[in-house]
């Protein structure tokens, strides 16, 4: 699991020494290229040669298909290796999450934003189930998490792109709106904050949010049987008493 204080040079060193984490990966390849340029001081021609050599160790790599990406890595490796020390969630992002009217799905969505922002991408690898579960504090199976992600997709918050290669599913959940610079409504500044995000968000909301089963009104959960807003609870009680009399 990557730590919050995301240090590209640390990750790049691991890739340089151990190879790809899970087989050929475009993002990891860029980090490798940055390592060659900034740590070893290689220039374009040597970087390109080394990248092809490095990738060729992976059987799923195809030099012809990936030619464009190799070129991209050589060019973009000029950007320095960075370290990230804080990430923010904006008010608009929280408002967008709250439209889901499902507290667990909100936490998962915001966790995806945090992971993406930490790594400075607008998408999150579909392989990061454990990390998403840990940051969102959601205790569920991978299949259940998959159905939460489907909710986000239906709400037009994310767009999944997956492909199958050698019986191995790979891909990303692209986040459709992401603000890297805006004003912080919630700010995360350490590993501890990141893995406590579920509690931080709950505190921010004033408690565990639930939505009335009838009118979808937002409420703070008062107990496990709490499912209706006051109005609809009274209505149900009235109906129950009337039915009891008949
Ligand atoms: Zn209601």
Image: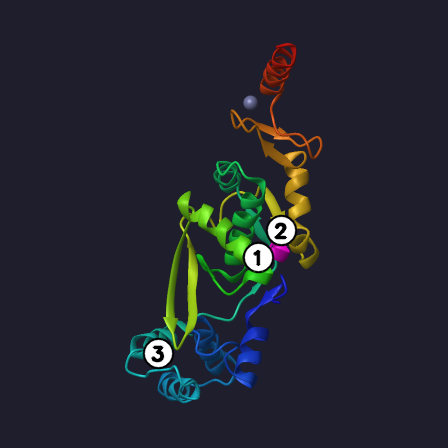
Q: Nearer the viewer, mark 2 or mark 1?
A: 2
Front residue (pair 155, 35): 155
| Image quadrant where one finds the C terminus | top right
Q: Which of the two labelled residues, at mark 3 and mark 1, occupies the earlier sequence position?
A: 3
Front residue (pair 120, 168): 168
C-alpha span from label 3 to label 2: 38 Å
User: What is the crowding at mark 3: few (fewer than 14 residues within 10 Å), some, or many (at least 20)?
Assistant: many
> What scheme was used to colour the molecule?
rainbow
Q: Is residue 58 above or below residue 146?
A: below
Residue located beneath label 2 in the image: 138
In terms of image quadrants, where is residue 191? bottom right
Q: Is residue 150 left or right of residue 238?
A: left
x 61%, y 47%: residue: 187
Number of dots carrying numbers: 3
x 63%, y 57%: residue: 134
Q: Is residue 13 magenta?
A: no
User: What is the crowding at mark 1: few (fewer than 14 residues within 10 Å), some, or many (at least 20)?
Assistant: many
The magenta segment is 133-141
Residue located beneath label 1 in the image: 132
Circles 2 and 1: CB atoms closer than 8 Å: yes
Residue located beneath label 3 in the image: 70
């Amino acid at each position: 699991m990557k730590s919050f204080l995301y240090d590209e040079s640390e990750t790049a060193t691991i890739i340089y020494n151990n190879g790809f984490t899970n087989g050929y990966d475009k993002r990891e390849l860029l980090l490798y290229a940055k390592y060659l340029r900034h740590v070893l001081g290689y220039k374009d021609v040597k970087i390109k040669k080394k990248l092809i050599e490095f990738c060729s160790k992976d059987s799923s790599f195809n030099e012809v298909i990936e030619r464009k990406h190799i070129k991209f890595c050589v060019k973009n490796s000029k950007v320095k290796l960075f370290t990230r020390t804080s990430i923010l969630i904006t008010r608009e992002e929280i408002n967008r999450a709250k439209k889901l009217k499902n507290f667990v799905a909100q936490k998962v969505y915001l966790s995806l934003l945090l992971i993406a922002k930490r790594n400075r991408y607008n998408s999150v690898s579909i392989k990061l189930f454990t990390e998403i579960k840990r940051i969102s504090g959601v205790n569920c199976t991978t299949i259940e998490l998959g159905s939460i992600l489907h909710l986000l997709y239906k709400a037009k918050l994310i767009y999944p792109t997956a492909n199958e290669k050698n019986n191995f599913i790979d891909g990303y959940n692209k986040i459709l709106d992401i603000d890297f610079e805006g004003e912080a409504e919630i700010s995360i500044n350490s590993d501890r904050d990141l893995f406590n995000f579920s509690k931080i968000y709950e505190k921010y909301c004033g408690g565990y949010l639930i939505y009335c089963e009838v009118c979808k009104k937002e409420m703070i959960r008062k107990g496990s049987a709490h499912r209706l807003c006051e109005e609809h609870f009274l209505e149900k009680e009235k109906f129950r008493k009337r039915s009891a009399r008949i």
